[in-house]
Amino acid sequence: MKESPKGGEGSTVFAAGSGSMNEYGYLAIEYDCRLPLLKYTNVGWAIERDIYAGELPDRLDREIEHNTDTSDISWLSERNPQVLELVAERITRSGDSRYFPFLMQWNKKASRRKSYNRRQAILSLR
């Protein structure tokens, strides 16, 4: 075990061992008083964010295949903003116009912060 360079006091990153996520430095343990909490390290979060951003378009595909009403996208808006930025970027790269109704609803229901990637996706699919 070694102290996390970014975790500070009370944070430990596992670095050596037989191959689990925390042993490779993807997870860290932080303590809240006496309770141990697992958290992603910067490297771990970058990997998880990319994997998760790849799964959300798959869910959109399933919703499109089942002709789901595009007005209920609350499940999408509740995700991490960094992940959503990657999702919008992937939709833009795909050029698939099937996503357009979802993007329009997402844009209406999204927080006040404007997403550059979301706007770019809408413009590219018009």
Image (cartoon, helix red, strand yellow):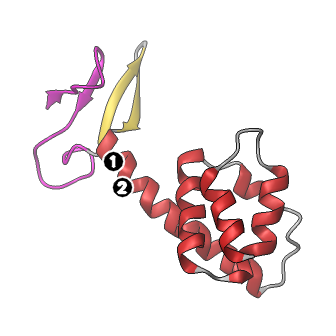
Query: Front-most of 92 and 42?
Result: 92
Instruction: Tell me residue 64's x, y (percent).
Output: 76, 82
Element under label 1? helix
Whether residue 91 sits left or right of residue 42 in the image: it is right
Task: Residue 106: tell me if it is visible.
Answer: yes
The main secondary structure of the magenta stretch is loop
Per the image, the residue denoted by label 2 is 47
Q: Is residue 73 visible?
A: no
- In terms of depth relative to the viewer, which is nearer, 115 or 53? 115
Rendered residue at 70%/76% (across/down): 125
- Hey, which quadrant is residue 69 in on the image? bottom right
Classed neighbour count for the residue bearing mark 2: other residues with Cα under 10 Å, few (<14), some (14–19), many (≥20) = some
Quarter of the rendering occupied by the N terminus: top left
x then y, percent, for residue 27: 31, 41
Contact flag, marks 2 and 1 (Cβ < 8 Å): yes
Give the residue pinned by disc 1: 44
Given the image, on which type of amino acid does mark 1 rest? Gly
Residue 45 sits inside the magenta stretch: no
The residues tagged by marks 2 and 1 sit, at their Cα atoms, a distance apart of 5 Å
Q: What span is in magenta?
A: 1-25
Q: Is residue 20 magenta?
A: yes
Q: Secondary structure at mark 2?
A: helix
Residue type highlighted by circle 2: Ile
Could you tell me which quadrant the C terminus lies in? bottom right
Q: Which residue sits at x=73%, y=82%?
A: 98
- Relative to 98, does residue 82 appear above or below in the rendering? above
The disc at residue 61 is none
x and y, in percent, of residue 82 in the image = 53, 47
